[in-house]
Amino acid sequence: MADNVVLQNVKTVDGTSIDIVIKNKKIIDIASPGTATGEKVIDYKSKVYVSSGWIDMHVHAFLEFDPYGDNIDEIGYKSGVTTIIDAGSTGADRIHDLVANAKKSKTNVCAFLNISRIGLKRVDELSDLSLLNKKELMRAFEESKDFIVGLKARISSSVVGENNVEPLKIARAFSKETDLPLMVHIGSGPPDINDVLKLLEKNDIITHFLNGKSNNLFDYEGKPLSNFLKAIDRGVHLDVGHGNASFSFKTAEQAKEHGIHFNTISTDIYRKNRLYGPVYNMANVLNKFLYLGYSLKEIIDAITVRAAAWLNKPELGRIARGDIANLTLFSVEDEPIDLIDSEGEKRVADQRIKVKGVVVNGEYNEC
């Protein structure tokens, strides 16, 4: 990379055109469009947007696990995402391996620690309560506390088996012990979604909140459950977590109709849904929210400003002089695209987001 790189004639989501100058990994200037100079100038001719680097709050980035695993950089910077949060792929037994993999990757990585020590080595990791080992969890947390941002509990019938809501009660106790928030996967019951909601507190995350399963957050008339509204009032954070089976256009339309908006948009991406859909990449997930009528600003804020705020890393959600440069460059094209949700329902949108490049920790990469 040249010593001094200029991203010329880029525009922010509010339409303001700027030049961004990067040197020694940092943003050293934000100038009027077309005025900055440097060793390497990339002129985007005001056709490309720039935002702070995209943050995906829910991915599975431990390549060794199947089916829920993938390569960090394939689901990270190569798809326009500069920071990924692994959502509980590893528990206490393997979190150190994920840390090691992250150090060898370009993409910024942190993680939710699975409350089961085995993580996603198998997909019913909360069916055996002996695997929810407090001593091992605390050891892993102390060893990797700069890497771990929260605890992950997958609370659906295929994961918890006969244990109902008990794993979530144990997770709540672990949360209090570590002072870490919970990310809670919701899906088919039992346990009943109301029993799950009652255990969630401020700054906890409900991921898969737009799933179309019968145990979801809306009643048979499409109205939000009262316990869901109470959880929102308590400050529980709503994350999309699209995945193979957890995003429904119908549920998303119900949420929008009742004024319930996402806090963050995430992919729940891993190799299968990256290669074969319905996820593919972050841009494809964002296209679904463009189709639903959300503004570009609200969509991009969800994967920059609001994600960074939850992580308590505001520098990841802004473009400012002196900060390490983490940026995503993208366009919005007027061309049709077929979109498919996790229920197999198809829609056709007339606009699509295309990633053009990223800057990861000061390094420019075309996409």
Image (cartoon, rainbow, N blue to C red):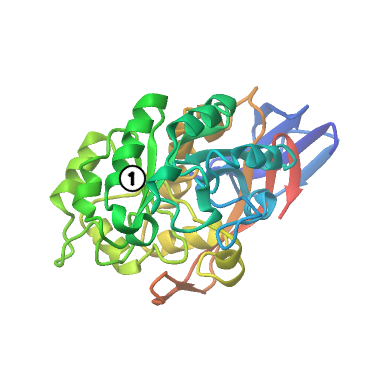
Kindly identify the residue that appears in the image at 70 percent across and 34 percent down. Answer: 361
Q: Seen from this angle, which residue lies furthest front?
A: 130
Residue 187 coordinates in the image, percent (x, y) = 33, 59
Residue 45 visible at all:
no
Front in this rendered view, residue 165 or 211:
165
Q: Position of residue 145 (x, y in %)?
A: 54, 26
**Residue found 34% across the figure and 58% down from its top:** 161
Q: Identity of the amino acid at label 1?
A: Pro
Q: Give the residue pinned by disc 1.
A: 167
Between 291 and 13, the residue placed more toward the observer is: 291
x then y, percent, for residue 221? 14, 66
In the rendered image, which quarter is residue 253 located in? bottom left
- Neighbor class of circle 1 (other Cα within 10 Å; few <14, some 14-19, many 20+) is many
The residue drawn where x is 74% and y is 33% is 36
Foreground: 311 or 173? 173
Report the number of discs: 1
Secondary structure of the residue carrying tag 1 is: helix
Left or right? Give the position of 4 relative to 267.
Answer: right
Q: For residue 344, what is the image quadrant?
A: bottom left
218, above or below 197, in the image: below
The quarter of the picture where residue 247 lies is: bottom left
Q: Is residue 177 visible?
A: yes
Picture coordinates of residue 31, whole percent (x, y): 66, 31
In front here: 95 or 328? 95
Query: Which quadrant of the figure contains the N terminus?
Result: top right
User: What residue do we see at 47% from left, 37% from top?
Assistant: 305
